[in-house]
Amino acid sequence: MSDCCSAPGLMPFNTALKQLLDNVPSATKTQMLAIEDCLDRVLAADVVSPVNVPPHNNSAMDGYAFHSSSLSLGGEQTMQVVGRSFAGEPYSGKTNVGECIRIMTGAKLPECCDTVVMQENTSVDNNTMALVKAPKAQANVRYCGEDISKNEAVFSKGHKLSAIDLGMLASLGIADVEVFAPITVAVLSTGDELKSPGQTLSDGDIFESNRFALLGLLARLNVNVLDLGIIADDKQAIRDAFIKADLEADVVISSGGVSVGEADYTKDILDELGSINFWKIAMKPGKPFAFGKLPNSVFFGLPGNPVSALVTFYKLSVPGIEKMQGQPYKANTQFSAITTTPLRKSPGRMDFQRALLSYNEQGLAQVTSTGSQGSGVLSSIGRANCFIVLSAEQGSVEAGESVIVEPFTSVFQ
Ligand code: AMP
Ligand code: MG
């Protein structure tokens, strides 16, 4: 791993992301799991359909089924109803020319039939069905394997299973799948000034918030979490906490102490324990960020400022954790919108400004800054649903100009 601190200036955001992704290990541990336990889990093997869906030709309508050769009968078209096929109760007999069966939606179409007329286009008197409007030959039939055919690839390794995917697996008769095992992520906050909510603040203290937000975000990522709490700015306490975290977790995340202030021992201890790079990334919020390896785990050192901590976690640690759980990197969706507010920016760093995306009366995307973009102003994220992403080179933007927006994913909503 190259040390970017020695490089002059700041590291471009995309370089940091690439280095991070190149250096986190890929997922290896897998497990077989019942599909009902697989929501948001990542497949560790391709899934191939063991069956045809639908498993047999069936009717798309409630109506009458017959062979299309019956349609060539001249004059008024009538057919004798000789049987019925209901869902789960197929017709096992034959139909001759001029004969049909009653059939319901989804019911199996017998081999002797290839066409269905919807019941609204018929009139029926006792066992005689008259075609009020004749269907085309082969109309209203759903064919065996039309949705998915046997041995067709359904999902690839690395696919994250949604609720709909679980329904799909069930529809194929698949009860268990092989998924990647969740990794364990340890979280700790450093700082003598930090007090837990519920405690009394002494002069100069603040309530600790990063860990609570991070634990919530981690819950969305389906990892096992090890919460190590607040660690005082004390060399031995920090060393003990990192050693414990490294022994028990695959990923260790700390916040605070990476911008190297006087009472921040994090850097010294990490240097002693592992191989960690202290990056200065050309991104705002979030310039300081530490990344590297401890003896048994990957380390992400987030800045202490709450907005910086959350944005660097979301933009850098989340893709790393996703890779470690088997998910290939996929950039978040971005598109253009008109900003309704002017945006202040000086060239140099990539900006992730917090904003609210909406649609105007013409249906065009517009975006409005959520106000103060200070790296400690947590409410600026709380009120936002997207980032306005301004490139490093870009300067200030006037209201009415087009900007790139990146809606928050479900991890951040
Ligand atoms: P540091 O990176 O440790 O110098 O912290 C930068 C700023 O973030 C300081 O104002 C800290 O008080 C604040 N900070 C650090 N950790 C936390 C935390 N876990 N929750 C809230 N604020 C924090
Ligand atoms: Mg600190």
Image (tube, helix red, strand yellow):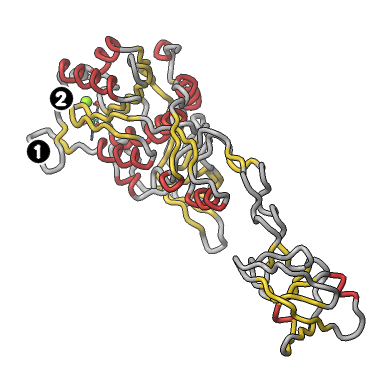
At mark 1, the secondary structure is: loop
Image quadrant of ligand 2?
top left
Residue 228, visible in the rendered structure: yes
Quadrant location, the N terminus: top left
Q: Residue at x 33, y 33 (%)?
A: 308
In this view, the mark in front (2 or 1): 2
Quadrant of res 81: bottom right
Picture coordinates of residue 251, whole percent (x, y)? 34, 25
Q: Residue at x 73, y 90 (%)?
A: 125
Residue nearest the viewer, comparing 22 with 61: 61
How many numbered discs sit on the rendered protein?
Answer: 2
Picture coordinates of residue 395, whole percent (x, y)? 48, 34
Residue nearest the viewer, comparing 243 with 75: 75
Q: Is the CB atom of the residue marked by disc 1 within 8 angstroms of ligand 1's nearest atom?
A: no
Q: Which mark is residue 232?
A: 2
Image height of 49 relative to 125, above or below = above
Image height of 11 relative to 60, above or below = above
Q: Amino acid at mark 1?
A: Leu
Label 1 packing within 10 angstroms: few (<14), some (14-19), many (20+): some
Mark 2 and mark 1: Cα distance apart in space: 15 Å
Residue 342, visible in the rendered structure: no
Q: Which mark is residue 79?
A: none
Q: Earlier in the sequence, mark 2 or mark 1?
A: 1
Outermost bottom residue: 125
Residue annotated with mark 1: 201
Picture coordinates of residue 117, whole percent (x, y)? 75, 75
Q: Amino acid at mark 2?
A: Ala
Outermost front residue: 93
